[in-house]
Amino acid sequence: MKSSRTLSARPRVVKPDHPLQWLAEPLVHEPSFVLKSWFGGRTIMLHGRHHLFLTTQGEPWQGVLVCTAHEHQPSLRAEFPSLQPHPVLKKWLYLPESHEHFERDARLLVRLVRARDPRLGIEPSPRKKKKSVKRIRFGDKL
């Protein structure tokens, strides 16, 4: 006996929620908000700029990376003593999930993003153009 249900040709792939995705909740109603998969984590984007990178890949990639320029690091570190330069990606600041004030400080950073604090956010790198590949069809002379 045949089933009356029709199966789709391709199963729908649903990406699992990220463990730190709760940090993005206050921003979801912002018109320019994007939560994008990026280098094994999620980047919170507003107004086309990367602001916070959420990562849970084990130390030193276990927490929130703050996308900021070097000149803004001293004022952010004065406001958030829990922030430190990332040990690998030194151009950004790092809030480790293991820090005792992680939740509080992460929520405050999200508030700064929402308030459009000029110290936060970097422009994404321009995409490189893919090299065009010349396709050879059967019968073409080499």
Image (tube, helix red, strand yellow):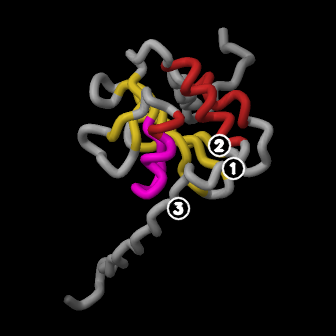
Above or below 130: residue 83: above
Q: At numbered mark 2, what does the secondary structure look like: helix, strand or loop?
A: helix
**Disc 2 versus disc 1: distance between alpha carbons?**
5 Å
Give me the disc on residue 116: 1
The three-letter amino acid code for the residue at tag 3 is Glu
Q: Using the rendered image of the protein, determine whether residue 80 is visible from the camera's viewpoint.
A: yes
Picture coordinates of residue 7, whole percent (x, y):
64, 25
Q: Residue 77 falls in which quadrant of the image?
A: top left
Picture coordinates of residue 65, whole percent (x, y):
43, 38
Q: Are there few (<14), some (14-19), or many (20+) residues within 10 Å of tag 2?
A: many
> Which region shows up in magenta?
65-76
Picture coordinates of residue 42, whole percent (x, y):
50, 37
Residue lying farthest to the top in this orientation: 1
Residue shown at 59% from the left, 31% from the top = 12
Picture coordinates of residue 135, whole percent (x, y):
33, 78
Instruction: Check disc 2 and report the residue beneath it.
Output: 113
Which one is in front, 56 or 15?
Answer: 56
Image quarter of the C terminus: bottom left
The three-letter amino acid code for the residue at tag 1 is Arg
Q: Residue 130 falls in which quadrant of the image?
A: bottom left
The three-letter amino acid code for the residue at tag 2 is Val
Q: Using the rendered image of the protein, determine whether residue 37 is visible from the camera's viewpoint.
A: no
Q: At numbered mark 3, what does the secondary structure look like: helix, strand or loop?
A: loop
Q: At numbered mark 1, what does the secondary structure look like: helix, strand or loop?
A: loop
